[in-house]
Image: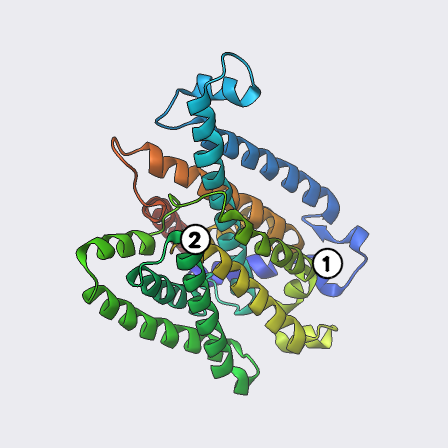
Amino acid sequence: MLSSTWSACCTRNRPAALSIGDNRTDMIGYRPIYIQLIVVTLALTTVLLVSVLLGLTIGSSGDFGTAWQSLLGRGEPDATLEVIIWQLRWPRVVLAATVGASLALGGLVFQALLRNPLAEPYILGVSGGSAVGAILGILAGFGFFPGLALSAFAGSLAVLLLVLLLSARKAGSSDSLLLGGVMVNAFCGAIIMFLISISQSGQMHKIIFWLMGDLSAAGADSLPLLLGVLPCFVLIYILAQPLNLLLTGQDNAAAMGVNVRVVMPVLLLATSLMVSLTVCQSGLIGFVGLTIPHVLRLTIGPDHRILVPASILTGASYLVVCDLLARSLPAEGEMSVGIVTALIGAPLFIALLWRDRR
């Protein structure tokens, strides 16, 4: 099944980095690593820029040509359109790109650390804790920012610490982390159902919309909270080489010089913090962290020195496009972006499973 494909992808064409060679001669598919890194990064950056431009220029207000002229500063100035582009669409595009990048990178890291192809960014209970915190904030009458976002963030961090404490006796082993995350998520699910059952009708609609993933509340005042994900991006990229070695197993990685007791907790904390910072503003958006890493492994190989920036750029582009579809497809209003990612991600994941059977 998919696990065999994932294992084969991680062992076939394994980079020479796994034998700790010279970085200038590390190869993937017999090409120098830095050449592929530059090519992939430039190509995916171009895709992201195009996605951002589409997100800014396509919408219910004004046609594409008018919005494009406004972005370039040509033609007659339209104050209303400029407000829509820079105060409504721009914060939403930035939030979508940041959330997509974080979820894709989170899925990549957890799949490598836990050596489980079905691992995704919410595997350690971040989603359950964030949802409980957000629902409590909604029931308390908090506004989106900072009240609701911070309550969701506090809930995700509390659950993360609980899972890490539960697995501490086994030194953060993969099995204990997975079991702890599953059990805590199940417990949070029960709390969520209870809180929904006692909520009022108006609050229930807001809760359900948040649980399905919602980027409509993005604003310039909430974007500074996203700056916390940038150090996480940098730290994970710095640890991309140890992440390659961890694919061979903790014992083998330790034998090749990786301080497993330090690297694994740092990666787990950085990834969970990154996901928590974004989920608290976007709600629960599925399939991004599950499908994007698999597609990238099949297309560009298993080396995390390339996969980390590729996941950031691809996840960002993907969610910007999904959010554009979510607000453009309905004749009136908009749908949750989580619905679009599920409609695209689920068939794509099934296709990956079907491909593995052949």
Residue under pointer 2: 145
Residue 339 appears at what percent x and percent y?
32, 47
Up-down relation of residue 203 to residue 83 (above or below): below
Residue under pointer 1: 16
The foreground one among 93 and 43 is 93
Residue 204 appears at what percent x and percent y?
23, 57
Q: Are marks 1 and 2 in contact (CB under 8 Å)?
A: no
Up-down relation of residue 13 to residue 321 (above or below): below
Identified by mark 1, the residue type is Ala
N-term mark: 1 or 2: 1
The residue that appears at 36% across and 61% down in the rendered structure is 134
Q: Is residue 219 left or right of residue 234?
A: left
The foreground one among 88 and 105 is 88
Residue 42 appears at what percent x and percent y?
65, 37
Q: Quadrant of the N terminus?
A: bottom left
> Image quarter for residue 58?
top left
Q: Dot 1 lies on which element? A: helix
- On residue 180, the disc is none
